[in-house]
Amino acid sequence: MKEQIIQEIQSEIIRFTIDFFRDKGFIHLLPVMLSPITDPLGPDPNSSVIKTAEIEYLGQGLQLMQSMILHKQIALSNGFDKIFLLSPNIRLEHPKRNKSGKHLFEFTQLDFEIKNAKILISLN
């Protein structure tokens, strides 16, 4: 019963989030799961991430997505003005982080971008 309640709450949060951004004129992009490129800036040297998950498929090295930064920039340069995604993330962090109680091996990130945004706008 507890698991069902958690899933119902999660489902409502996701529905509300999608409705909120769509009502504001954002396009919902689906995340990229595997790519030859991921975060061009990472991992941060001060990060506790110890490895980027990689696979080889048909002779090409692919990384498990850690950041949609580059893919969002490509979408904005291809004519989208406002985008958002709910993107699953996996972080292979140092095992010491597990003991902190603050480590999330797997999580979902809400991310949005507005092309040429110059001022802080209210999404109310």
Image (tube, rainbow, N blue to C red):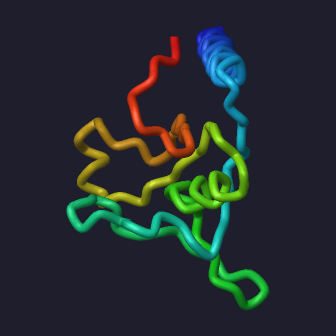
Q: Can residue 7 be seen in this view?
A: no
Up/down of 30 relative to 74, above or below:
above
Relative to residue 70, is residue 19 drawn left or right? right
Up/down of 56 relative to 34, above or below:
below
Identity of the residue drawn at 39% across and 28% down? 120
* Residue 40 picture quarter: bottom left
- Of 104 and 121, nearer the camera is 121
Q: Position of residue 48 (x, y in %)?
A: 27, 59
Identity of the residue drawn at 30% across and 57% down? 95
Relative to residue 56, is residue 64 drawn left or right? left
Relative to residue 3, is residue 19 drawn left or right? right
Furthest residue in direction right, as rendered: 58
- Of 78 and 3, nearer the camera is 78
- Of 15 and 48, nearer the camera is 15
Q: Can residue 74 be seen in this view?
A: yes
What is the total number of numbered labels drawn onto the structure image?
Answer: 0
Q: Where is residue 2 in the image (x, y as percent from the top left)?
A: 59, 11
Identity of the residue drawn at 21% across and 62% down? 46
User: From the image, which quarter does the N terminus lie in?
Assistant: top right
Q: Position of residue 99 (x, y in %)?
A: 25, 44
- Of 26 and 61, nearer the camera is 26
* Residue 16 picture quarter: top right
Q: Where is residue 93 in the image (x, y as percent from the top left)?
A: 35, 58
Identity of the residue drawn at 64% across and 60% down? 74
